[in-house]
Image: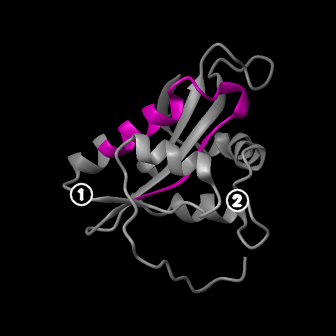
Amino acid sequence: MEIRSFEVADTEAVVGLWQECGLTRPWNDPRADIERKLTVQPELFLVGIEPDLAQEPGDANGAVIASAMVGYDGHRGWVNYLAVSPAWQRRGYARALMLEAERLLTARGCPKLNLQVRSNNSEAIEFYTALGYEPDHAVSFGKRLSPD
C-alpha cells in the first residue's frame, strides 16, 4: 500500500470505503466532512492506495483501500475516519496509516494524539491498545453546529 494525501478525485472511493467499513452515520454527511477537511490541513487527509488495482478502466493511480483524516489544532492531534477495506485488513495497513499520522504530527510539534472509538467497538479498542494508546478517562462531549 502506498500512502498519499487525498485528492478530490478520491471522494467517491473514500465515501464508499467509509460506508463499507461502517463509519458513516445518518447525522454526518461524509461528503460535507470531506469538503470541510479540504479547507483545513488537506495534506493531513491520507489515503492508502493499492497501486496494482485500477478504480476504473484506464486508471493508472490504483484503488483507494484505506484512509485516515488527521488534524492538529496546536494543542492536540486527532485522527478520524481511520478505515481499511475489509478485503485488505490484517495486513498492517491501519498500523501504517497511524504511524504516518504520528510522524506527520510529530513533525509539526504535536505533543499528543487523541482519537475517539465507539465504546462497543472492541476490535478497534484492541487495535489502538496494541499501538500503545490508552483510555484518557475523559468524557467526550459534542454539540452539533451544522445540521448535516
Q: Could you tell me residue 140's position as x and y percent?
A: 49, 77
Counting labels gives 2
In magenta stretch: residue 89: yes
Chain-order first, disc 2 or disc 1: 2
Q: Nearer the viewer, residue 36 or 14?
A: 14
Residue type at the position of mark 2 = Arg
Q: Could you tell me residue 12's position as x and y percent?
A: 74, 45
Q: Is residue 65 above or below residue 25?
A: above
Q: Is residue 113 above or below residue 128?
A: below
Q: Residue at x 50, y 26 (%)?
A: 92
Q: Residue at x 80, y 18 (%)?
A: 57
Image-quadrant location for residue 73: bottom left
Q: Residue at x 70, y 17 (%)?
A: 53
Q: Is residue 63 above or below residue 100?
A: above
Q: Could you tell me residue 88's position as x and y percent?
A: 66, 26
Image-quadrant location for residue 136: bottom left
Q: Residues within 10 Å of mark 1 (few under 14, many from 20)?
A: some
Residue that sits furthest to the top in the current view: 52
Residue 82 showing in the rendered view: no
User: Tags 2 and 1 in contact by the CB under 8 Å rule?
Assistant: no
Question: What residue does disc 2 label?
Answer: 31
Q: Could you tell me residue 64's position as x and y percent?
A: 65, 32
Residue 99 showing in the rendered view: yes
Question: What residue does disc 1 label?
Answer: 110
CA distance for labels 2 and 1: 27 Å
Residue at disc 2, secondary structure: helix
Question: Magenta span covers which residues?
Answer: 78-102
Residue at disc 1, secondary structure: loop
Q: Is residue 16 above or below residue 135?
A: above
Point out which mark residue 147 bears. Answer: none
